[in-house]
């Protein structure tokens, strides 16, 4: 039975089917205007072609141009190896190990150039990959783990093989600006028109090869507003556990992409619908299971989408600070109720939550440091004395901490008045700031007796009870 299946999978007929039939379509007829392509991408394609190689713009950029969206960046695919690509450009870097590519730099812009790679199916057809001999010793061309996950992917191949190893049909379109043609092997143009997200090949096997593709379904369905093809959708539930085998640094990268698409809310919604949020961001599960936490996370993601829609950026540290805040806030309140002083309690809450999160999804140290600072500034923004206020304003994380305070105010967790005060304080000149500090001091005096009474009361285990900014 198994042998039959294997024979079927690797028979020349099956291989031809999985590689797809090459179809070319004129770019002009599809609404692509080569004149609107950036010079950087055109230069990379032309240099490669003039050196005698094949070169195409590929993936997200082609898909987005065909949909009339502005591509985020431009990737190029070629039959030149990284070592052949590099000397063709003045500023080019060889990067990656698991997935070796070349970055060609144009000022701050980077064009990613990847060599056509073979599909793990296409046994015996790969050429010139330097992983080849080592993998051959292991009895296969691609190194895989016990679950079938690809560990390396540096086996060079032809364009049809390269197309077959891409994830979705609409992500496997190639555009040659010199001839103005789109090359399609897997009915990507048809799916694009029908607004369908369809995995190339046999979806279960593709999820096993790389479980991150599960998250990519949620991301692209949200970003493009596409339907998920039934065959692509159905195996997801049975494979969601495979995300546990993915190195936490890769999960982090893919989650950041998901949050920064400008469709973070819709992506998170998809993750929940597909049952993929569990275990990925365990602390977000908890946050979303309580109405307060859910309101905060939703407001944060809604803001992020609006910022990105307006052409601004959202830093990963701000995003993750928001996502984990409901847990940190709750733990902070509990620790204070146990008698730990306010600042120490927040520090400890941050430690605990970041440690629990790190087990699944590794947040880079640089980012977790910034997250801590955003959190630590929250109680400090509640202390409106000259010393604290000026120090807070000069803090490199002030802007992010202030945006965070605005979110907390909007979700009823911090006082609107405090958020307004900080807005005024930033806008004011020196005299204005003095006046605001005096006004805050008067307010604090009037509040003082109430504040002492509150202190003695045992705070409830909710974020707002712990919120000193409200006092
Ligand atoms: P975006 O505009 O959001 O960057 P994109 O399609 O460019 O979308 P990337 O993550 O940048 O997405 O990947 C570039 C291309 O590489 C994809 O279009 C796809 O062809 C291929 N690709 C990326 N990740 C995978 C994967 N895990 N499995 C198969 N193919 C992939
Ligand atoms: Mg991309």
Image (cartoon, helix red, strand yellow):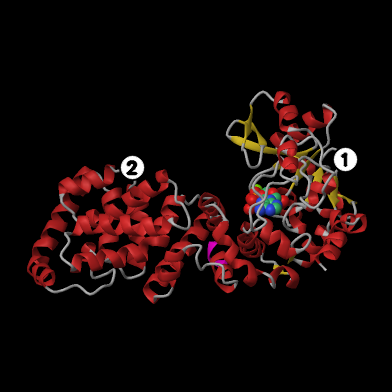
Does any portion of residue 180 appear in the rendered image? yes
From the image, tell me which residue sits under label 1: 179
As helix, strand or loop, the secondary structure at mark 1 comes to loop
Confirm or reject: label 2 Cβ below 8 Å from ligand 1: no
Q: Is residue 105 left or right of residue 198?
A: left
84 shown above or below 121: above
Q: Are marks 1 and 2 in contact (CB under 8 Å)?
A: no
- Write the residue at 76% across / 50% down: 120
Residue 216, quarter of the rendered image: bottom right
> Magenta part of the protein: which range?
262-266
The N terminus appears in which quarter of the rendering? bottom right
Residue 396 badge: 2
**SS assignment for the magenta stretch, majority:** helix
Vertical placement of residue 323 versus 426, above or below: below
User: What residue is drawn where x is 87% and y is 62%?
Assistant: 8
Q: Which sits earlier in the primary sequence, circle 1 or circle 2?
A: 1
In the picture as drawn, the residue positioned furthest to the left comes out as 449
Q: Looking at mark 1, is its residue's CB closer than 8 Å to ligand 1? A: no
The C terminus sits in image quarter: bottom left
């Amino acid at each position: 039975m198994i042998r039959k299946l294997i024979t079927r999978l690797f028979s020349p007929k099956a291989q031809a089917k999985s590689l797809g039939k090459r179809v070319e379509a004129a770019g002009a007829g599809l609404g692509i205007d080569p004149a609107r392509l950036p010079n950087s991408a055109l230069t990379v394609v032309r240099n490669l072609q003039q050196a005698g190689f094949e070169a195409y713009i590929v993936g997200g950029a082609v898909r987005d141009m065909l949909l009339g969206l502005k591509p985020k960046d431009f990737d190029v695919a070629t039959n030149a190896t990284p070592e052949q690509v590099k000397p063709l450009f003045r500023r080019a870097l060889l990067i990656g190990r698991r997935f070796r590519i070349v970055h060609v730099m144009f000022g701050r812009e980077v064009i990613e150039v990847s060599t056509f790679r073979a599909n793990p199916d296409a046994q015996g057809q790969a050429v010139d990959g330097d992983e080849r001999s080592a993998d051959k010793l292991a009895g296969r061309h691609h190194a895989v783990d016990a679950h079938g996950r690809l560990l390396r992917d540096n086996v060079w191949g032809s364009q049809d093989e390269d197309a077959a190893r891409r994830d979705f049909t609409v992500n496997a379109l190639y555009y040659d600006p010199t001839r103005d043609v789109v090359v399609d092997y897997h009915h990507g143009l048809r799916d694009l028109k029908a607004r369908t997200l369809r995995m190339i090949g046999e979806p279960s096997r593709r999820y096993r090869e790389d479980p991150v593709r599960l998250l990519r379904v949620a991301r692209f369905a949200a970003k493009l507003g596409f339907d998920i093809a039934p065959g692509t959708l159905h195996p997801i539930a049975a494979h969601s556990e495979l995300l546990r085998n993915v190195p936490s640094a890769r999960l982090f990268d893919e989650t950041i992409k998901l949050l920064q698409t400008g469709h973070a809310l819709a992506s998170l919604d998809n993750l929940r619908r597909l049952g993929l949020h569990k275990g990925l961001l365990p602390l977000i599960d908890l946050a979303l299971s309580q109405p307060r936490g859910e309101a905060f996370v939703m407001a944060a993601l809604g803001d992020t989408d609006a910022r990105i829609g307006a052409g601004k950026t959202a830093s990963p540290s701000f995003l993750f600070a928001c996502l984990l805040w409901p847990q940190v806030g709750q733990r902070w309140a509990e620790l204070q109720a146990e008698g730990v002083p306010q600042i120490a309690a927040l520090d400890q809450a941050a430690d605990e939550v970041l440690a629990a999160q790190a087990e699944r999804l590794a947040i880079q140290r640089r980012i977790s440091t910034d997250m801590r600072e955003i959190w630590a500034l929250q109680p400090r923004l509640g202390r409106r004395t000259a010393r604290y206020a000026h120090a807070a304003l000069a803090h490199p994380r002030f802007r992010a901490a202030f945006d965070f305070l605005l979110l907390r105010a909007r979700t009823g967790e911090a006082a609107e008045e405090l958020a307004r005060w900080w807005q005024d304080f930033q806008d004011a000149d020196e005299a204005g700031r003095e006046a605001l500090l005096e006004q805050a001091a008067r307010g604090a005096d009037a509040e003082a007796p109430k504040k002492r009474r509150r202190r003695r009361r045992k705070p409830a285990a909710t974020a707002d009870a712990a919120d000193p900014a409200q006092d």
